[in-house]
Image: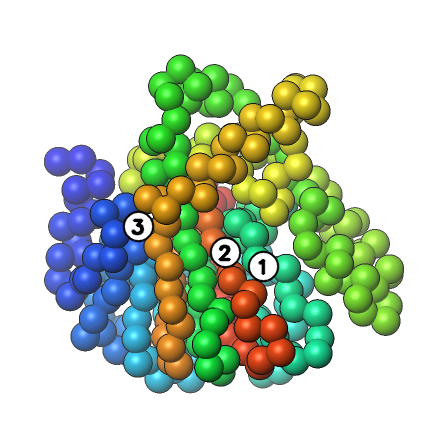
């Protein structure tokens, strides 16, 4: 039995509604307010590895319960970004859009915090307040994107490394919009120097190969001249735009999305400008993501 089929067997106790042949599933009849059952915890972990992103409707979670859900999959005290934090629970980041304020630049494909040496392995995102329409999120399978590449190019990519940098992202604009933005940006750059990751990684649970680059944080490929690097990255990034590697969620109040940050990229659609939106995010990780 392969590693992937073993994962699927563990998840079989769940009522899973698959959304595409490639990525994404609704998990029905599970109340995430209580995830203490060991069999449920193992099934949820297996399902996340298998489907890469899981959706749960009609959940009512306290802040502590959301953190408990994240602990099913990893350590919620690992890598965080620079979003505002919850006043009582600092591991919860507030993904908040305020009318009249500049929104976060999450409307491009990215995996979270790959400018870190040890990025989070996943995220639990809980919808608190939503606009009446818009604000969908899309996920793309980085394993399926890798599978679409010709074998000869796959072999070449496995010899390459890419540089990931906070300066290549939307975070500079986020900092510079604040009254003390220059100081905050200098501090962030000092804390987060550019880091290097392999262009192709292997998922430690499923054993599948991952195309580990993203437009938001990957600046260039080491060892290539800039025009060559830009051309190759442009092709690799284009694979995430293919509908057959994607799944799209239309948020509803009290929806929870949990995704594998190693195996996916995501894109938050910013078509609700002028409306208020609030989601609570808990990233989780391990001592080593890979």
Percent of width and height locating residue 91? 55, 70
Query: Could you tell which of marks 3 and 2 lies nearer the N-terminus?
Result: 3
Horizontal placement of 196 versus 282: left or right?
Answer: right
122, above or below 15, in the image: above
Q: Residue at x 79, y 49 (%)?
A: 190
Percent of width and height locating residue 82? 66, 63
Secondary structure beneath disc 3? loop
Q: Are marks 1 and 3 in contact (CB under 8 Å)?
A: no
260, above or below 155, in the image: below
Say how many tags the image has. Answer: 3
Q: Nearer the viewer, residue 187 or 252?
A: 252
Circle 3 packing at 10 Å, graded few (<14), some (14-19), many (20+), is many
Q: Residue at x 37, y 46 (%)?
A: 243
The answer to which image quadrant residue 24 occupies is bottom left
Q: Is residue 176 visible?
A: yes
The residues bearing labels 3 and 2 have C-alpha atoms spaced at a distance of: 14 Å
Circle 2 packing at 10 Å, graded few (<14), some (14-19), many (20+), is some
Q: Residue at x 86, y 61 (%)?
A: 183
Query: Could you tell which of marks 1 and 2 lies nearer the N-terminus?
Result: 1
Q: Are marks 3 and 2 in contact (CB under 8 Å)?
A: no
Q: Which mark is residue 23?
A: 3
* Residue that mark 1 sits on: 106
56, above or below 106, in the image: below
* Residue that mark 2 sits on: 267
Q: Quadrant of the C terminus?
A: top left
Secondary structure beneath disc 1? loop
Query: Could you tell which of marks 1 and 3 lies nearer the N-terminus?
Result: 3
Q: Quadrant of the N terminus?
A: top left
Q: Are marks 1 and 2 in contact (CB under 8 Å)?
A: yes
């Amino acid at each position: 039995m392969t590693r992937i089929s073993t994962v699927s067997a563990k998840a079989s106790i769940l009522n899973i509604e698959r959304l595409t042949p490639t990525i994404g599933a609704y998990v029905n009849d599970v109340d995430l307010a209580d995830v203490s059952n060991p069999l449920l915890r193992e099934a949820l972990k297996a399902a996340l590895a298998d489907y890469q992103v899981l959706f749960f409707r009609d959940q009512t979670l306290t802040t502590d319960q959301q953190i408990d859900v994240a602990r099913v999959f990893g350590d919620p005290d690992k890598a965080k970004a620079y979003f505002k934090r919850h006043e009582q629970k600092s591991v919860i980041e507030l993904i908040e859009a305020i009318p009249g304020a500049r929104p976060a630049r999450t409307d491009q494909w990215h995996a979270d915090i790959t400018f870190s040496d040890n990025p989070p392995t996943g995220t639990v995102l809980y919808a608190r307040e939503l606009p009446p329409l818009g604000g969908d999120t899309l996920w793309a399978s980085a394993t399926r994107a890798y599978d679409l590449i010709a074998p000869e190019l796959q072999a070449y990519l496995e010899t390459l490394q890419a540089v990931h940098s906070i300066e290549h992202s939307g975070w500079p604009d986020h900092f510079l919009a604040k009254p003390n933005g220059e100081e905050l940006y200098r501090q962030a750059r000092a804390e987060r120097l550019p880091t290097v990751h392999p262009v192709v990684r292997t998922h430690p649970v499923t054993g599948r190969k991952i195309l580990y680059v993203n437009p938001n944080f990957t600046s260039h490929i080491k060892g290539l001249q800039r025009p060559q690097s830009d051309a190759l990255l442009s092709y690799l990034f284009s694979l995430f735009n293919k509908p057959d590697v994607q799944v799209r969620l239309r948020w509803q109040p009290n929806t929870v999305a949990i995704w594998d940050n190693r195996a996916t990229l995501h894109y938050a659609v910013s078509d609700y400008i002028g409306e208020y939106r609030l989601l609570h995010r808990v990233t989780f990780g391990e001592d080593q993501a890979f």
